[in-house]
Amino acid sequence: MKNKIPVTLMEQEAKEAPEVIARQIRENKDIISSLCRRLRRHRPPFAMTVARGSSDHAATYAKYLLETRMGMVTSGAAPSVLTLYGTQLYEKGGLVIGISQSGKSPDICEMMESARKRGAVTISIVNHEESPLAKAAEYVIPLRAGEEKAVAATKSYLGSLSALLQLGAEFLQDRELLGCLDRLPEFLQQALEKDWSGAVDALKGISDTLVIGRGYGYPIAQEAALKFKETASVHAEAFSGAEVLHGPFALVKKDYPVLLFMQGDSSLPGMIDLGKEIKALGAFPLVAAPAGLISEEEIKKTAEVYLPLPEALSPLCDPLMAIQAFYPMVARFAVSRGYNPDSPEHLKKITETI
């Protein structure tokens, strides 16, 4: 009989996400509706995101959402342009979105304050509504995640994605996407019930890995790679399915583990082909994809380990289910390697970058 892996704070907090997001969607409806009415009246010509760490991965999701669904060119800010080099950016009329669990990083707050003074529409997506970042912005979208004690962010990251998704769906007045959003907590709960123990067993002895996604799945790959590093001391790098063939693919050798996240949109055929190529090289692909999206025959050609997910809800929603299922797995994976994912070495919950 295998030793039972204890449940960590990280895993417990990750499992709170469905309830957090249900509350967030319900309680933020009026805030986001009012904000979107303004944005539709005076549509910003561009958007900029300001974030670090897991929140910056949420900002990558914002980029794909805003560009693919709204046609709004979106760039991630480099706060040091202002805070270290003293250069003021031309942000007038633009949309600036700051994302932070704590809302305390001085450089992000300074960027937000500058953007607001220079005529941008500023939005803070934060867990702490009285934080400096919340006060620096014109609009605040609360994460409503409650206290998060583990150093590794989980429910606050998922809450950041769902807040962005609600903002996008409301701006577009997209009834189908709003309907999917209402069902998202239910599907996240289903994702938590999927068995990913095969990944813990398959990955236990590794020292490094690649994590691959494309489009809406790329921010999830970024987040998963970070969690491998900070919780389990595994060197993991995230790449787009388009970029990985340009150089990083040289790393893929026999038995080398590669985690691929897939969703049901135009990126899927290319991701399946990539999985097949990885497997043909004798490497070890692990594939996370919604149920029914890939035939059993194709899965055999693409994956050494298939990581199950609920049926597809929406290409924008499905990556949230994937990272929801990933979090408990990586917490257990870390423990199996002798690490405490709640308190990783050399890290602290709030990082105040200047």
Image: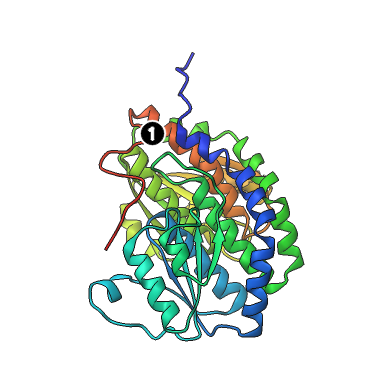
What's the image's color scheme? Answer: rainbow
Q: Percent x, y for residue 149?
A: 43, 39
- Amino acid under disc 1: Ala
Query: Which is nearer the eye, 169 or 336?
Result: 169
Does residue 350 show up? yes
Q: Percent x, y for residue 227?
A: 40, 45
The C terminus appears in which quarter of the rendering?
bottom left
**Quarter holding residue 106:** bottom left
Q: Looking at the image, which residue is at 58% across and 45% down?
A: 299
* Number of marks drawn: 1
Give the left or right position of residue 71, taking residue 29 as reference: left
**Quarter holding residue 52:** bottom left
- State whether residue 196 is above or below residue 161: above
Give the left or right position of residue 279, taking residue 41 as reference: left
Residue with the most extreme left position: 85
Does residue 254 show up? no
How crowded pointer 1 is (Cα within 10 Å; few <14, some 14-19, many 20+) is rated as many
Q: Looking at the image, which residue is at 51% across and 31% down?
A: 197
Mark 1 lies on a secondary structure that is helix
Q: Looking at the image, which residue is at 25% across and 79% down?
A: 86
Query: Which is nearer the eye, 137 or 194?
Result: 137
Query: Which is nearer the eye, 331 or 79?
Result: 79
Q: Percent x, y for residue 79?
A: 32, 70
Residue of label 1: 334
Give the left or right position of residue 26, taking residue 323 as reference: right
Give the left or right position of residue 272, taking residue 291 as reference: left
Q: Percent x, y for residue 228?
A: 38, 43
